[in-house]
Amino acid sequence: MSLSDADVQKQIKHMMAFIEQEANEKAEEIDQKAEEEFNIEKGRLVQNQRLKIMEYYERKEKQVELQKKIQSSNMLNQARLKALKIREDHVRDVLDEARKRLLQSVKDEARYKDILEKLMLQGLYQLMESDILVRTREMDGPVVSSVFPDVLVKYKESSGKDLQLKLDTELYLPSECAGGIELYTARGRIKIVNTLESRLDLISAQLLPQIRTSLFGRNVNRKFTD
C-alpha cells in the first residue's frame, strides 16, 4: 500500500523533528560539557593566580618585616653609639679637668720639686747609667737643677753608684706641656719620658675602668673591666 504525498511529508517532518531534537540535545550536551570544562579551567587559573598573589604579598610582608628589623637594629646601634660618645665625652672632660689641676699643681714650687725628684729617681733606676742628660721645660731649668744634689745622694745610697747629671740647655720640652722631665743616656740611645702628661696618661689608662664605673655605674653586660 503506497503512502500518499501527505503521509510522506508527515513522515519527513517527523524525522526532521527527531533529528533536530537529537541535534539540540547533543548541542546542549556539548555546551554543558564545554561550560563545565571552562569553569574547571577558570577555577584552576583563578586558584593559581590567587596563590601567586598570596605568595607575592607574603614575600612583600617578609621583606617589610626584615626591613623593619634592619631599621630598628640600625636605630638601636645609632643610639648606642651616641650614648657611648656621650660617655666618652664625659670621661674626656674628667681627664681634661685632671690635666688642668695638674697644671695648677706645678705652681706650688715645693710640691713640684718633690714631684721632679721622684720622677728623676724613677727614671734613673730604670736606666742604671752613670752619665745622664736631663731635658725639661726652659722655665723649669732652675728648679730641676736645684734637685740634682738630693737626687745624687739618694741614688748613691740606693744603688751604691756615682752618677753625673747634666741639664740639657740646647733642647727643651714644649713650653705648653705641664712639666716633668725626659732622661737620656749620654749617647741618646735610651730615653725615659717622665713628663707629667705621660704619667697622667699612664694612670688614666689604668684607672679608666674605675672612672667609667664611678661615672656611669657598673656595666652588667661586661665580663671584664680592663
Image (cartoon, rainbow, N blue to C red):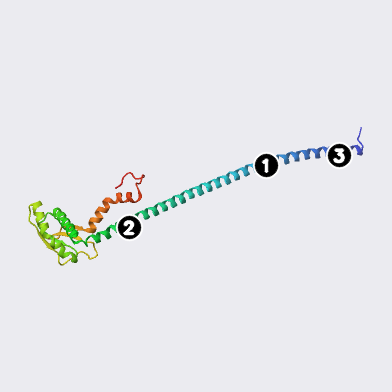
Counting residues from the N terminus, which is met first, the one under dot 1 or under dot 2? Answer: 1
Rounded to the nearest angstrom, the CA distance separating label 3 from label 1 is 38 Å
Mark 2 lies on a secondary structure that is helix
Quarter of the image with the N terminus is top right
Q: Amino acid at mark 3?
A: Lys
Are dots 1 and 2 in contact, CB under 8 Å?
Answer: no
Q: Separation of disc 1 and disc 2 at Cα?
A: 79 Å
Q: Looking at this view, is 18 or 78 the one in front?
A: 78
- Residue 105 is situated, as x and y percent measured from the top left of the image, at 23, 60
Between discs 2 and 3, the one toward the N terminus: 3
Q: Amino acid at mark 1?
A: Asn
Using the image, tell me which numbered label, if any, was put on residue 176.
none
Q: Secondary structure at mark 3?
A: helix
Q: Earlier in the sequence, mark 3 or mark 1?
A: 3
**In the depicted view, which residue is nearer to us: 6 or 142?**
142
Q: Amino acid at mark 2?
A: Asp
Tell me what residue is drawn at x 74 percent, y 38 percent: 29
Tell me if label 2 and label 3 are in contact, CB under 8 Å: no
Q: CA distance from mark 2 to mark 3?
A: 116 Å
User: Residue 93 shows which numbered tag?
Assistant: 2
Per the image, the residue denoted by label 3 is: 13
Q: 7 or 103, which lies in front?
A: 103
For disc 1, the marked residue is: 39
**Residue 156 % position (x, y):** 8, 54
Q: Which one is in front in this view, the residue at disc 2 or the one at disc 3?
A: 2
Left or right position of 6 against 210:
right
Q: Nearer the viewer, mark 3 or mark 1?
A: 1
